[in-house]
Amino acid sequence: MYGKIVNGELQAPPVEISRNIQKMLDAGFKPVMDNKPAHDINTQDAVFSEYVDRGIYIDVIYEVVDIEPTEEELMVEQTNKVMEMLNINLDDTLSNLSDEQALEVPNMFPKWKKDKKFKAGDRFFHDGKLYKVPKDYVEQDLEHFNSDLFTKIAKEQVEDKFDKVNDLFDKVNGVIDKIDKDKVKDKIKDKIKEPVEAPQEVVEEPTEENPDVNQ
């Protein structure tokens, strides 16, 4: 990249000479050294400050500043302090939450960092999403986040899990209902099979006072 400083701004070379280094140098354009200083990307940021002409090249100057914590990060920090004062281990508390409960407080989980070691079952927050480390995960050093290595915890997944359980209960209840109905049918069939006795005719013996009693 080549350029020259004009009124404090970096001016790019015209298109017609941008592919010819000698013509750019003859026109006063110089190589631009744009190297950000080393900094902690999780807590710091490199902010552009100015362009400085070093004679044979142009240097881009950055200032390293601390990143202001977001409202969610402040909440997590304050919650951690409260937990510490109450002698409560937040990590243990979070690990006991179900995935459904974890989705209610995703910002409470640690953020993914390339130098942080995760093990199977751990959950972490990254780019607005909650992830879980699968059982077959092999601990490794990652320079960049790779979503293929982890399982994203989504509301749909949790709901689907409960839907499957509810479907199972419905099927069980259906079987129970069928069994109960079959029992009723069996009882009715048993009643039908039972012989019904015909009423017996009562015969009275004739007497002198009533000789025609059975007529």
Image (tube, helix red, strand yellow):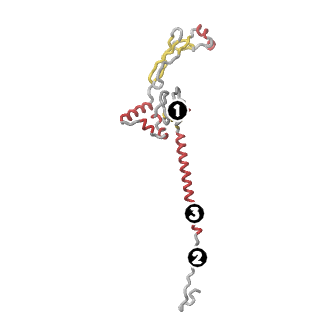
| Residue visible at 57% across and 63% down in the picture | 186
Q: Which residue corresponds to the image point at 43% horizontal and 35% vertical from the top-left?
A: 91
Residue 157 image position (x, y, % from top left): 54, 40
Q: Residue furthest top?
A: 26
Quadrant for the N terminus in the image: top right
Quarter of the image holding residue 188? bottom right
Identify which residue is drawn at 53% across, 50% down. Answer: 169
Closer to the chain start, of discs 1 and 3, is: 1
Looking at the rendered structure, the secondary structure element under dot 3 is helix
Q: Label 1 belongs to which residue?
A: 138
The quarter of the image holding the C terminus is bottom right
Q: Estimate the spatial distance between the alpha carbons at disc 2 and disc 1, rounded to whole Å.
A: 83 Å
Q: Amino acid at mark 3?
A: Asp
Instruction: Name the mark on residue 186.
Output: 3
Instruction: Tell me where residue 154 appears, x and y as whole percent.
Output: 53, 38
Q: Position of residue 200 (x, y in %)?
A: 57, 79
Residue denoted by label 2: 198
Q: Which of 86/215 is in front? A: 86
Label 2: few (<14), some (14–19) or many (≥20) C-alpha neighbours in 10 Å? few
Q: Nearer the viewer, mark 1 or mark 3?
A: 1
Q: Nearer the viewer, residue 42 or 75?
A: 42
Residue at the outermost bottom position: 208
Q: Residue at x 56, y 64 (%)?
A: 187
Query: What's the amino acid at mark 2?
Result: Ala
